[in-house]
Image: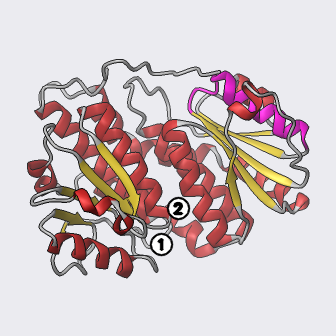
Amino acid sequence: MSNPSQMRREVEEIPQAVDRLLTEGQVAVDATAAEIAKRDPRFLLTVARGSSDHACTYLKYASELLLGLPVASVGPSVASIYHAPLRVDGSLCIAVSQSGKSPDIVDLTRAVRTGGAYAVAVTNNAASPLSEAASATLDIHAGPELSVAATKTFVTSAVAGLWLLARLKGDEALLKAIAGLPAELERATRADWSAVEATVSPDRSLYTLGRGPSWAISNEAALKFKETCQIHAESFSSAEVLHGPVSIVGGGFPVLAFAAADAAEPVLVEVADAIARKGAQVFVTSARAQHATPIEAVRTGHWLTDPIALIVSFYAMVERIAVGLGIDPDAPRHLNKVTETV
């Protein structure tokens, strides 16, 4: 492409951004993990909106599966609109915002800290109001992100949070996989998802599916279809889609299923195959499929880092779809880069 979009350039910068995070963020991650370990939190809270909230959903599964630490997402309006005090003594809070400026995210972070939580800001702006409201800050080191659609900041937020949890766990296999992510994400930017590109169109809706950590990736993908391509997409857990949503699936209905190499892969593929047998055009990132169409998946050496590679491959694809539709993915209609909600 002679004049690539800003989104395209930023997707291709993701491996370098993650490498920069791993190089420049270690002191903060190690110090924050040590402080959290001393406090031995009983549960974890997350504070975020939009893509950042999808990163928090990913971290929810990582926390519960790695640490046995249950996670609740708290609605920012609890503090910003309703001004309700929260009793969260003995908890850890992770607040994610690429800009660190949205008043409701800042207000809730301040409120949970006042209520007794140790609050960690995960942000691309270490001098932001969110950082001032938090107990500690993890700078995601993504560098400038100019396209309205978050890509680098989603990935580096997810990696920073996962790195923190892996340090808390002392999981050497996961830490090794995180260290190897830059090379794997470089491969992921070049994954061949052309079969999906050829099927998706703006004149029909589609579903995205996931299970466990990959459900967070499904959520993010559905959002990106809407904001960059003006395509209506809904995300479901593969455990939920057969409980009603499947009833609108007809012949050729597009479905994109995100499978990592984890314990959920067999059951997710089983659902993908079942929907394909109903006539849908189902694509799945797994070679196990019998009826759905397998698409290339970059495996990263650990089931918890696999979803990161999947979203990078998706970002590369969805940008191409937007450009092919004549849509500027850098400036989706009705949207601003920084959304400040109260």
Give the magenta-colored segment's residue range. Answer: 98-115
Is residue 300 left or right of 8 when viewed as pictured?
A: right
User: Pointer 2 and pointer 1: residues touching (CB < 8 Å)?
Assistant: yes
Is residue 151 left or right of 142 when viewed as pictured?
A: left
Q: Residue 332's spot in the image, x, y percent?
A: 31, 23
Separation of disc 2 and disc 1 at Cα?
9 Å
Q: Amino acid at mark 1?
A: His
Total residue callouts:
2
Q: Residue 126's spot in the image, x, y percent?
A: 68, 29
Q: Nearer the viewer, mark 2 or mark 1?
A: 1
Residue 208 occupies which quadrant of the picture?
bottom left
Q: Earlier in the sequence, mark 2 or mark 1?
A: 2
- Can I make out residue 22 in this image? no
Location of the C terminus (image quadrant): top right
Name the residue located 31 percent from the left edge and 36 percent from the top edge. 226
The disc label shown at residue 226, or none:
none
Name the residue located 25 percent from the left edge and 81 percent from the top edge. 288
Q: Residue 154's spot in the image, x, y percent?
A: 48, 42
The disc label shown at residue 178, or none:
2
- Can I make out residue 78 in this image? yes
Q: Amino acid at mark 2?
A: Ile
Query: Callout 1: 10 Å neighbours few (<14), some, many (20+)?
Result: some
183 up-or-down from 151: above or below: below
Q: Secondary structure at mark 1?
A: loop
Q: Secondary structure at mark 2?
A: helix
Name the residue located 42 percent from the left edge and 43 percent from the top edge. 16
Query: Callout 2: 10 Å neighbours few (<14), some, many (20+)?
Result: many
Residue 262 occupies which quadrant of the picture?
bottom left
- 86 or 258: which is nearer to us? 86
Q: Residue 334's spot in the image, x, y percent?
A: 36, 18
Residue 123 occupies which quadrant of the picture?
top right
Which residue does the numbered mark 1 point to in the structure image?
302
